[in-house]
């Protein structure tokens, strides 16, 4: 039996646009600005449609977080099979688009327990993937895993990258070039192509 057309939304793409609008507002203005009215206006739909797809704003925030998390995790899983896993992780974690949104979710988690629980689950999956990718990289170069624990090395790479993004977001860039070049030098040593890569990266940075 055919479904009642009245039960179907008029705009089949509205749900995705609402999620994209929410993410954009959070990045540009912070999570507090992502109200149902603002999100609906940015997405070009009626306010009532927000609650058609998402019973509460928490449900909308969770959908945005899970969508971004799934995409990020997929990229990280590919890092395990990349030629230079550590470099891929470094590049992923220096992507300001996701790090800025992640920071807003961290702030939101202080007020919404359900967001905090989701972030914890995501962070645990990220840590596992980053550690696995780092293990692959270190083993490939015969590095002592007891002396240099993969989980610690992966945390150093990812946390330095995220710290750079967080500081850049507020206009703080002092020391960033030097730190980036230091990390790149160590990644170049692992790649076995230090001179060429260092020269290329310096050119890009300037």
Image (cartoon, rainbow, N blue to C red):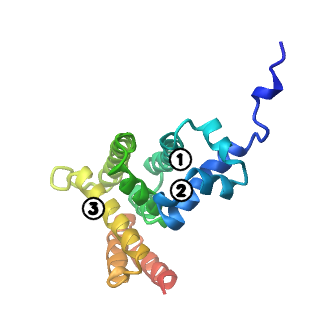
- Tell me which label, 3 or 2, sits earlier in the chain: 2
The residue that label 3 is drawn on is 156
The residue that label 1 is drawn on is 64
Residues 98 and 103: in front is 103
Residues 137 and 159: in front is 159
- Regarding residue 97, the answer to whether it shows in the image is no
Indicate the position of residue 90 as horizontal and vertical percent values: 40, 63
Indicate the position of residue 184 as horizontal and vertical percent values: 37, 73
Is 76 located above or below residue 1 in the figure?
below
- Regarding residue 161, the answer to whether it shows in the image is yes
- Tell me which label, 1 or 3, sits earlier in the chain: 1
Confirm or deny contact between disc 3 and disc 2 (CB under 8 A).
no
| SS at mark 1 in the image | helix
Residues 140 and 2: in front is 2
In percent of the image, x 40 and y 44: which residue is there?
A: 115
The residue that label 2 is drawn on is 34
Is 141 located above or below residue 178 in the figure?
above
- On the picture, is 28 further left or further right than 152? right
| SS at mark 3 in the image | helix
In percent of the image, x 27 and y 54: which residue is there?
A: 142
In percent of the image, x 68 and y 54: which residue is there?
A: 43
Q: Residues within 10 Å of mark 1 (few under 14, many from 20)?
A: many
Number of numbered discs visible in the structure rendering: 3
> Could you give the CA–CA distance between mark 3 and mark 2, rounded to whole angstroms?
33 Å
In percent of the image, x 50 and y 46: which residue is there?
A: 61
């Amino acid at each position: 039996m055919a479904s009642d057309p009245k039960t179907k939304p008029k705009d089949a793409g509205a749900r995705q646009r609402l999620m994209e609008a929410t993410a954009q507002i959070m990045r540009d203005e912070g999570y507090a600005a992502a109200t149902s009215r603002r999100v609906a206006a940015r997405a070009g739909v009626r306010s009532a449609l927000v609650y058609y797809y998402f019973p509460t704003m928490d449900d909308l925030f969770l959908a945005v977080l899970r969508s971004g998390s799934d995409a990020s995790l997929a990229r990280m899983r590919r890092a395990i099979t990349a030629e230079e896993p550590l470099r891929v992780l470094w590049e992923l974690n220096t992507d300001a688009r996701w790090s800025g949104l992640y920071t807003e979710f961290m702030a939101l988690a202080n007020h919404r327990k359900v967001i905090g629980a989701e972030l914890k689950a995501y962070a645990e999956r990220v840590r596992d993937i980053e550690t696995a990718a780092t293990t692959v990289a270190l083993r490939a170069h015969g590095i002592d895993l007891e002396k240099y624990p993969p989980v610690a090395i992966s945390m150093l790479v990812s946390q330095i990258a995220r710290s750079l993004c967080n500081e850049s977001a507020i206009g703080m860039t002092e020391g960033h070039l030097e730190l980036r070049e230091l990390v790149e030098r160590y990644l170049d040593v692992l790649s076995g192509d230090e001179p060429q890569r260092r020269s290329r990266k310096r050119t890009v940075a300037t």
